[in-house]
Amino acid sequence: MLALRKAIAGRRHRACRGTGPATVSDRRSRSISATVTTSIYRWDDGANKQPTPEVRTDAIRIALAGLASGDEPETILAKLGVLRIRSNTFPAEVLLELASDAIDEAGATATDPIDCEKLRERLLPERPFSGKTEHHKSKYAISAAAMIHGGV
């Protein structure tokens, strides 16, 4: 984990200096485009602080590859953290859209909804949620994904 943090910090530092693009390698997911490249704009003070379609795709790829390979949530978040844009909701908005797509794939409808009662405890028993903040954030994420799915 320490090596991952150092690698990420080094890549951010190079991107800040403008010496090249920041890259993150996910060796476990060779079948899903192992190298993710992001642009320097994220650390630039310029006016363009919106993610490109490629970076949005990279965020989805990192999340799905991490889930498919059984990575810990903290590891996936560390990889996604490299893509974070200061003063922007990216990549959280992309993850909410991905969750909305998952609800659609599950076939949830108004007449046949997903049972959200104790959803975290059923699907993530190894991940304890403690404190009001964690409970509120996870409840918001579930509710927001459902609202996006419903077109709100």
Image (cartoon, rainbow, N blue to C red):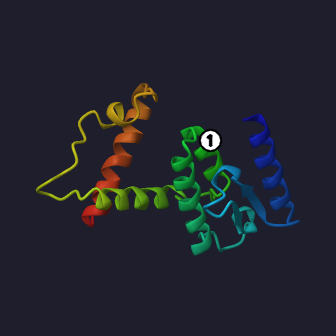
- Picture quadrant of residue 104: bottom left
Quadrant assignment for the N terminus:
top right
- What percent of the width, then of the height, locates residue 75? 62, 41
Front position in the image: 125 or 84: 125
Judged from the image, the secondary structure of the residue bearing numbered disc 1 is: helix
Tell which residue pokes out farthest to the left in this image.
111
Front position in the image: 146 or 134: 146
Any part of residue 36 in sight:
yes
Front position in the image: 5 or 105: 105
Say left or right for 55 vs 115. Answer: right
Residue for badge 1: 75
Residue at screen point 34% across, 30% down: 121
- Picture quadrant of residue 72: top right
- What percent of the width, then of the height, locates residue 111? 11, 56
Residue at screen point 81% across, 42% down: 6
Quadrant assignment for the C terminus:
bottom left
Tell which residue pokes out farthest to the front in this image.
31
Q: Is residue 54 above or below residue 127?
A: below
- What percent of the width, then of the height, locates residue 33? 65, 64
Q: Is residue 134 above or below residue 144?
A: above
Amino acid residing under circle 1: Thr
